[in-house]
Structure formats: C-alpha cells, structure tokens
Amino acid sequence: MDLLQPLLTAMALEGSYDIKDPCYGHDLVNPDVPTCLQGSRWSEIAQGIMGGDISDKNATLVTQDNFHRVYTVTPVHLPRINNTCDGTSACTLQSITVTENYYNRLSPFDTGKTEIGAVEIKAKLMSRQSVQVAAGNKTADFHENDEVGQRCGDINK
C-alpha cells in the first residue's frame, strides 16, 4: 500500500473520474452528494496560488471547486468571488472555481500504455488582481499582477 500511496494521493487531489464520476450539475455549485465528485482539490490550491498573498490585508481565501464541462455555452459556468473584505479586519474570502479533467481516450483498459491521471486539468480561476481587490487591495493592477511572468506555469511547478 505504501508504494501506491503517492498515486492515490495524486488521484484524490486531481479529483480523478476513476475514483468517482464528476457531478456536472446544472447550477454553478454542484450538489454535495456521495454519488459524485463535486470538484478538484488541486484547482482549489491553484486558486490560492493564483490569488497571491493576501495576509497583509488580514484576509484568507477559501475556494470551492466544481466540476463542469468548460466548453458549454448554456449554462456558462464561470469562477467568482462571493464577498469582499475591507483590508483591515479579519476576513475570509469565499471563491468558486470551475474545473474539467481531460483523460486520454485511447484505451479504456488500464494496461499502462496510456496515462491513468488527467492529461489536462482545465481550470477557470479568478485573476490575481480580482482576488487582491476583493481582499481590500484597491490599487491592485492587472498589468502588474497578472501579465508578469508565467503564472499558470508557476502554479503547475
């Protein structure tokens, strides 16, 4: 069991569709039921990295991810931040992200020829600027916060 533990941990973090089917509910927030997975823990962690440090604003970020097909038009599922903070008193920002895992479709059998994990995790996250502004940093600038470097590449590292 110790040998497989890193793989099982990664599959749980990803929200592997091999563990349980995704909920894919109609509403933005999927139902919290035992028959399907609500979202990906990895995307919740990624949103925290994307949002950056907000501790100087006495704020913390709590994210709930939800599985949806990211290419759908009706309904459109987009990430959001549900509240704002004043930047001085202790506050918890509540955010919602949207994720779809994509798996290699070449082989339905686990023969080792194709990956067992997601080939791609398509995640819709809120920008660093939007998290910073919601945390109380009213001067956060998109060009300084989100156009610098390779933010998604940094998250994947």
Image (spheres, grey):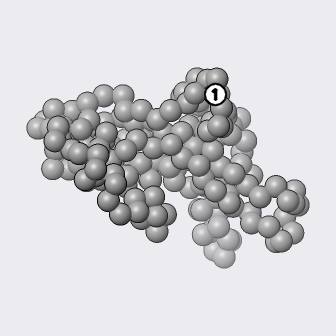
At a point 48% along the width and 39% down the height, the residue shown is 97
The residue where tag 1 is placed is 73
Is residue 122 shown above or below 115? above
Which amino acid, by three-letter code, is at mark 1? Val
The location of residue 147, given as percent across then percent down, is 34, 54
Q: Is residue 10 above or below residue 42?
A: below
Q: Relative to residue 32, is residue 91 drawn left or right?
A: left
Query: Left or right: where does residue 13 sit relative to residue 101?
Result: left
- Relative to residue 38, is residue 115 depicted above or below? below
Q: For the view shown, which residue lies furthest in the bottom direction?
A: 3
In this picture, is 40 found above or below 109? above
Q: Tell me if mark 1 has few (under 14), some (14-19) or many (20+) residues whose alpha carbon lies within 10 angstroms of its own.
A: few
Q: Residue at x 17, y 37 (%)?
A: 138
If the image is split into quadrants, where does the N terminus sit? bottom right
Residue at image position (37%, 33%) is: 81
The x and y percentages for residue 48 are 37, 50
SS for callout 1? loop
Q: Quadrant for residue 77, please give it.
A: top right
- 15 horizontally vs 58: left or right: right
Residue placed at 35% from the left, 63% from the top?
A: 149
For this orientation, the residue located farthest to the left is: 88
Q: Position of residue 27 (x, y in %)?
A: 58, 23
Q: Where is residue 89 shown, x and y percent of the image?
A: 13, 36
